[in-house]
Amino acid sequence: MDVEAFVSVHQPQWDRLAYLTRRQRRLSGAEAEELVVLYQRVGTHLAALRAAGADPVSIGRLSGLIADARGAVTGAQAPVWRDISKYFLVSFPAALYASRRWWLTIGLLFYLVTAWAAWRVLAHPEVMDSIATPGQIKQLVEHDFESYYSENPAQDFALRVWINNATISAAVLALGILLIPSVFILWDNALNLGLSAGLMIGHDKGGLFFGLITPHGLLELTAVFVATAAGLRLGWSWVVPGPRTRMQSVAQTGRATVGMAIGLAAVLLVTGLIEAFVTPFLPVAVRVTIGILAELAFFTYVWTLGRRAYRQGEYGDIDAADREATAPVSA
């Protein structure tokens, strides 16, 4: 076989296949059929060139064209980076926005309990005496609370904080199906935070307390509220499934809940970095500003990308094509 003549005769078909492959997302019905036919035909051309002992460059070029066309014909999976970008730009913010009433309400109740616990310590000295001995309280407010942020290397501290916060978030998220355990964990954390605030404020260390807590605490607690809300929504979907069956309700909410875990881990990583690399080293005004900006950035993320995706029908679940079929229900 004359390889050069063969290439010359069939080159227009190869060029046409390359063109259709590049336009795979914008093909008409006739062009899609043509793509399949050319893909099969060019595959036989490649086999003929190999049998004729054509040069490796020509064979390699045609092999690459066949591989690209196969992806277009068979619907190859999208690149990983595209899935990641869709998750953080669509799925995760949509899930946050869909559950906004839950985590905003939980956050409000948390801060009310925290404020109540701090008030109890300040208004009733006997409560303070029941927490610890005067010597232990003095050690906490004058040394331990502040040194906690700088007594370990920053990178080790960041990792430890991240693991600790991720563990708490995972616990309230996973236990949400049982409802009560998540509420108990959040209640316990609100009381502990309130007691610490009361002790610090009661010893004229309120400025130090808020200067150390605010930079990372605003966003960190928000992430915990979101995790708690996701878990409680999962449990509530079993109690009140709505128009769906209980299994459908739990499956749909559960997929969105599990999907939020990755995004929350990323948020908590940011708070861990702030706590380890910002809080111990920067002036109070600067680090507090960074904490407030981080919190505002999160809310902007939810109310821009999240609201837009939610209005387009996204709520953090997998693609509609991958979901189970559901039976129609009456209104």
Image: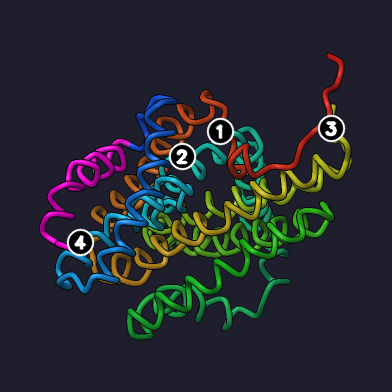
| Figure disc tally | 4
Which comes before the other along the chain, label 2 or label 3?
2
Q: Which residues are magenta?
A: 1-23
- Mark 3 residue crowding within 10 angstroms, few (<14) / some (14–19) / many (20+): some
Instruction: Pinpoint residue 295: horizontal percent, then vertical percent.
Output: 40, 45
Badge 2 marks a residue whose secondary structure is: helix
Residue, x 84% and y 55% (percent of image)?
A: 178
Residue, x 15% and y 62% (percent of image)?
A: 3
CB contact under 8 Å: marks 2 and 3: no
Q: In front of the other: label 2 or label 4?
A: 4
Checking the image for residue 206, the label placed there is: none
Amino acid of disc 2: Val
User: Is 9 in front, or is 127?
Assistant: 9
Q: Which residue is mark 3?
A: 244
Q: Which residue is mark 2?
A: 90
Amino acid of disc 4: Arg
